Amino acid sequence: TIMDKPEDNYWRIHDTLELFLKVEPDYVTQLLKEKQQSLGDFGIEKKDSYHITVSSFGYKYGVPIDADNIVDVRFLKNPFYINELREKTGQDADVFNYVFDDEVTKEFYEKYKELIFFMIDKYQYEGRDKVAIAVGCTGGKHRSVSVARKLHEDIAKLGYRVYLEHRDIDKGR
Protein backbone atom coordinates (compact mmCIF):
# COMPACT_ATOMS: atom_id res chain seq x y z
CA THR A 1 0.00 0.00 0.00
CA ILE A 2 1.03 3.62 -0.29
CA MET A 3 1.32 3.76 3.51
CA ASP A 4 4.23 1.30 3.38
CA LYS A 5 6.41 3.87 1.58
CA PRO A 6 5.25 7.25 2.89
CA GLU A 7 8.38 9.06 1.70
CA ASP A 8 7.48 8.18 -1.93
CA ASN A 9 3.76 8.92 -1.62
CA TYR A 10 3.54 11.97 0.66
CA TRP A 11 0.94 13.96 -1.31
CA ARG A 12 -1.17 10.95 -2.24
CA ILE A 13 -1.32 9.97 1.43
CA HIS A 14 -1.97 13.57 2.51
CA ASP A 15 -4.93 13.97 0.13
CA THR A 16 -6.34 10.53 0.95
CA LEU A 17 -6.13 11.13 4.70
CA GLU A 18 -7.86 14.50 4.38
CA LEU A 19 -10.72 12.85 2.48
CA PHE A 20 -11.04 9.93 4.90
CA LEU A 21 -10.94 12.25 7.92
CA LYS A 22 -14.23 13.69 6.72
CA VAL A 23 -16.00 10.36 6.24
CA GLU A 24 -14.16 7.74 8.37
CA PRO A 25 -12.07 9.44 11.06
CA ASP A 26 -11.93 6.28 13.20
CA TYR A 27 -10.43 4.33 10.29
CA VAL A 28 -7.73 6.97 9.83
CA THR A 29 -6.89 6.90 13.53
CA GLN A 30 -6.58 3.11 13.53
CA LEU A 31 -4.50 3.04 10.33
CA LEU A 32 -2.07 5.64 11.63
CA LYS A 33 -1.71 3.79 14.94
CA GLU A 34 -0.92 0.55 13.07
CA LYS A 35 1.72 2.33 10.98
CA GLN A 36 3.02 4.26 14.02
CA GLN A 37 2.47 7.56 12.25
CA SER A 38 0.43 10.70 12.86
CA LEU A 39 -1.47 13.26 10.82
CA GLY A 40 1.40 15.66 11.39
CA ASP A 41 3.70 13.33 9.45
CA PHE A 42 1.67 14.29 6.38
CA GLY A 43 1.26 17.99 7.05
CA ILE A 44 -2.28 17.77 8.44
CA GLU A 45 -3.10 19.66 11.59
CA LYS A 46 -5.61 17.88 13.78
CA LYS A 47 -7.31 21.22 14.42
CA ASP A 48 -8.18 21.32 10.69
CA SER A 49 -10.55 18.35 10.98
CA TYR A 50 -11.50 18.67 14.64
CA HIS A 51 -14.43 20.80 15.69
CA ILE A 52 -16.35 21.54 18.85
CA THR A 53 -19.99 22.48 19.32
CA VAL A 54 -20.98 24.34 22.44
CA SER A 55 -24.72 24.49 23.04
CA SER A 56 -27.11 25.76 25.65
CA PHE A 57 -30.34 24.01 26.55
CA GLY A 58 -33.18 24.00 29.07
CA TYR A 59 -33.63 20.95 31.28
CA LYS A 60 -37.40 21.39 31.13
CA TYR A 61 -37.18 20.58 27.39
CA GLY A 62 -34.99 17.50 27.84
CA VAL A 63 -31.29 16.71 27.86
CA PRO A 64 -29.49 16.70 24.48
CA ILE A 65 -28.83 13.09 23.47
CA ASP A 66 -25.78 13.87 21.32
CA ALA A 67 -23.69 15.70 23.94
CA ASP A 68 -20.33 14.32 25.01
CA ASN A 69 -20.20 16.57 28.05
CA ILE A 70 -23.16 18.09 29.91
CA VAL A 71 -22.94 20.60 32.74
CA ASP A 72 -25.83 21.78 34.91
CA VAL A 73 -25.64 25.48 35.82
CA ARG A 74 -28.97 25.69 37.67
CA PHE A 75 -27.03 26.46 40.86
CA LEU A 76 -26.00 29.89 39.49
CA LYS A 77 -27.97 33.06 40.28
CA ASN A 78 -31.05 33.14 38.06
CA PRO A 79 -31.81 36.33 36.08
CA PHE A 80 -35.34 35.03 35.51
CA TYR A 81 -36.29 36.38 38.94
CA ILE A 82 -35.25 39.93 38.03
CA ASN A 83 -38.24 41.53 36.30
CA GLU A 84 -36.21 43.65 33.87
CA LEU A 85 -34.13 40.60 32.81
CA ARG A 86 -36.85 37.94 32.62
CA GLU A 87 -37.75 38.48 28.95
CA LYS A 88 -34.13 38.89 27.85
CA THR A 89 -31.55 36.17 27.20
CA GLY A 90 -27.89 35.49 27.86
CA GLN A 91 -27.17 37.07 24.50
CA ASP A 92 -28.10 40.43 26.02
CA ALA A 93 -25.23 42.22 27.78
CA ASP A 94 -27.19 42.98 30.96
CA VAL A 95 -28.17 39.32 31.46
CA PHE A 96 -24.65 38.11 30.62
CA ASN A 97 -23.17 40.64 33.06
CA TYR A 98 -25.66 39.70 35.78
CA VAL A 99 -24.62 36.05 35.48
CA PHE A 100 -20.88 36.70 35.29
CA ASP A 101 -20.71 39.47 37.90
CA ASP A 102 -21.51 36.87 40.56
CA GLU A 103 -18.49 35.45 42.41
CA VAL A 104 -19.91 31.91 42.35
CA THR A 105 -20.18 32.07 38.55
CA LYS A 106 -16.63 33.38 38.23
CA GLU A 107 -15.20 30.64 40.42
CA PHE A 108 -17.25 27.91 38.74
CA TYR A 109 -16.43 29.09 35.24
CA GLU A 110 -12.67 29.16 35.79
CA LYS A 111 -12.72 25.61 37.15
CA TYR A 112 -15.06 24.38 34.41
CA LYS A 113 -13.04 26.05 31.67
CA GLU A 114 -9.85 24.39 32.93
CA LEU A 115 -11.55 20.98 32.84
CA ILE A 116 -13.04 21.53 29.37
CA PHE A 117 -9.73 22.74 27.93
CA PHE A 118 -8.07 19.61 29.31
CA MET A 119 -10.81 17.36 27.92
CA ILE A 120 -11.02 18.82 24.41
CA ASP A 121 -7.32 18.26 23.97
CA LYS A 122 -7.67 14.64 25.13
CA TYR A 123 -10.72 13.99 22.93
CA GLN A 124 -8.66 15.16 19.98
CA TYR A 125 -5.70 13.01 20.96
CA GLU A 126 -7.99 9.97 21.03
CA GLY A 127 -8.91 10.60 17.40
CA ARG A 128 -12.31 12.21 17.82
CA ASP A 129 -13.20 14.58 15.01
CA LYS A 130 -15.93 16.38 16.94
CA VAL A 131 -17.00 17.06 20.49
CA ALA A 132 -20.37 18.35 21.70
CA ILE A 133 -20.49 20.31 24.96
CA ALA A 134 -23.91 21.18 26.38
CA VAL A 135 -24.64 23.70 29.13
CA GLY A 136 -28.06 23.44 30.77
CA CYS A 137 -30.22 25.56 33.04
CA THR A 138 -33.94 25.46 33.73
CA GLY A 139 -35.29 27.14 30.60
CA GLY A 140 -32.22 27.47 28.38
CA LYS A 141 -32.42 31.24 28.07
CA HIS A 142 -30.28 33.00 30.68
CA ARG A 143 -27.57 31.15 32.62
CA SER A 144 -26.82 28.39 30.12
CA VAL A 145 -26.76 30.84 27.22
CA SER A 146 -24.34 33.11 29.08
CA VAL A 147 -21.97 30.30 30.06
CA ALA A 148 -22.10 28.67 26.61
CA ARG A 149 -21.44 32.02 24.97
CA LYS A 150 -18.35 32.64 27.13
CA LEU A 151 -17.08 29.08 26.68
CA HIS A 152 -17.45 29.35 22.90
CA GLU A 153 -15.46 32.57 22.93
CA ASP A 154 -12.68 31.10 25.08
CA ILE A 155 -12.36 27.86 23.07
CA ALA A 156 -12.20 29.88 19.83
CA LYS A 157 -9.20 31.78 21.25
CA LEU A 158 -7.32 28.47 21.36
CA GLY A 159 -7.63 28.16 17.58
CA TYR A 160 -10.20 25.38 17.45
CA ARG A 161 -13.08 25.41 15.02
CA VAL A 162 -16.01 25.92 17.39
CA TYR A 163 -19.72 26.42 16.83
CA LEU A 164 -22.34 27.89 19.17
CA GLU A 165 -25.98 26.80 19.33
CA HIS A 166 -28.79 27.83 21.67
CA ARG A 167 -31.31 25.02 21.35
CA ASP A 168 -34.10 26.35 23.58
CA ILE A 169 -33.53 30.10 23.62
CA ASP A 170 -36.81 30.84 21.79
CA LYS A 171 -39.01 28.23 23.46
CA GLY A 172 -41.75 29.26 25.85
CA ARG A 173 -42.04 32.81 24.55
Image (spheres, helix red, strand yellow):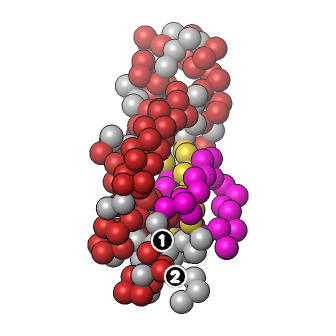
Question: What distance separates the C-alpha of mark 1 from that of mark 2?
Answer: 17 Å
Q: Can you say whether 32 is above or below 139 in the image?
A: above
- Residue at coordinates 57% horizontally, 20% vertically from top-left? 32
Local crowd size for mark 2, using a 10 Å CA cut-off: few (<14), some (14–19), many (≥20): few
Q: Nearer the viewer, residue 128 or 79?
A: 79
Q: Is residue 29 above or below residue 63?
A: above
The answer to which image quadrant residue 146 occupies is bottom left
Front-lying residue, 163 or 77? 77
Task: Give yes or no for residue 60 being in the magenta stretch.
Answer: yes
Q: Which residues are magenta?
A: 53-76
From this view, report whether residue 173 is shown above or below residue 107. below
Q: Nearer the viewer, mark 1 or mark 2?
A: 1
Q: Residue at x 67, y 73 (%)?
A: 60
Q: Quadrant of residue 3?
A: top right
| Residue 16 visible within the image | no
Q: Total of numbered circles in the picture?
A: 2
Residue 25's place in the image compared with 79, above or below, is: above
Which residue is at a point 58% across and 86% down the rendered structure image? 172
Q: Amino acid at mark 2?
A: Asp
User: Residue 97's spot in the image, x, y percent?
Assistant: 31, 67
Please tell me whether mark 2 sits on a helix, a strand or a loop.
loop
Query: Could you tell me if the residues under marks 1 and 2 are in contact, i.e. CB atoms within 8 Å?
Result: no
Residue type at numbered disc 1: Asn
Disc on res. 170: 2
The residue carrying mark 1 is: 78
Tell me the quadrant of the picture where the N terminus can be found: top right
Residue 37 pos. (x, y %): 51, 15
Please tell me which residue is depicted at 59% across the width and 71% down the height of the picture.
138
Of pointers 1 and 2, the one earlier in the residue sequence: 1
